[in-house]
Amino acid sequence: MSATLPQMSLVTPENAAYVPGVCNIGPWEIRRRRTIAIVGFAVAVVLLVALVAAGAPPIARLLVLLPVWGGAFSWLQARRRFCAGFAMAGISNFANGEAGRQAVTDPEAHRADIAATMRMTRDSFLIALPVAIVAVLLPV
């Protein structure tokens, strides 16, 4: 038995609907995640500048890993139209706010959502780690 990954290209803003492991949020939720991502990246830049200005040891610059990871995670959620928190809670949301939330009752669909969350966690870490390593290696 071979497992196949869901096709993300099937979901567009025009046909956005819940697809297990692929899409569980609509345009309003996507905008929220983009905003959170931008804030995360901005916090990372400010933190790095502050650490360098304070003369902190280079290893302390690893702290930028956390806001970059959070920013990358939020950006991937927006890009993939998929909210990890909703996946963990077993819900989807294609409307504005709580009124659009619907329960995901199929156990297979929930497992696909959890697997997508795990992949997104891994992918965002793999994006953030090299950024943090570069921050540590930057000359002062």
Image: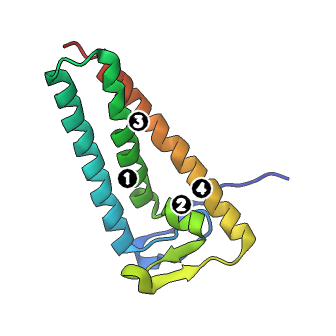
Labels 4 and 2 touching (C-beta < 8 A): no
Mark nearest the camera among 4 and 2 is 4
On the image, the x and y values in percent for residue 82 come to 49, 63
Q: On the image, numbered disc 4 is attached to which residue?
A: 116
- Tell me the residue that label 3 is attached to: 128
Task: Report helix, strand or loop for mark 2.
Answer: helix
> Which amino acid is tagged 1?
Trp
Left or right of residue 2, residue 112 in this image: left
Identify the disc placed on residue 8: 2
Q: Using the numbered discs, state the Cα–Cα distance from disc 2 to disc 1 in whole angstroms.
A: 15 Å
Q: Is residue 122 left or right of residue 47?
A: right
Q: What's under tag 3, amino acid-wise?
A: Ala
Q: Which numbered circle lies on residue 75?
A: 1
- Which label lies toward us, 3 or 2? 3
Task: Residue at 70%, 62% (x, y): give it.
Answer: 111
The alpha-carbon separation of the residues under discs 4 and 1 comes to 14 Å
x and y percentages locating residue 113 in the rendered image: 62, 62
Distance CA(mark 3)–CA(mark 1): 12 Å
- Mark 4 and mark 3 in contact? Answer it, CB < 8 Å: no
Are the two marked residues, 4 and 1, in contact with CB atoms closer than 8 angstroms? no
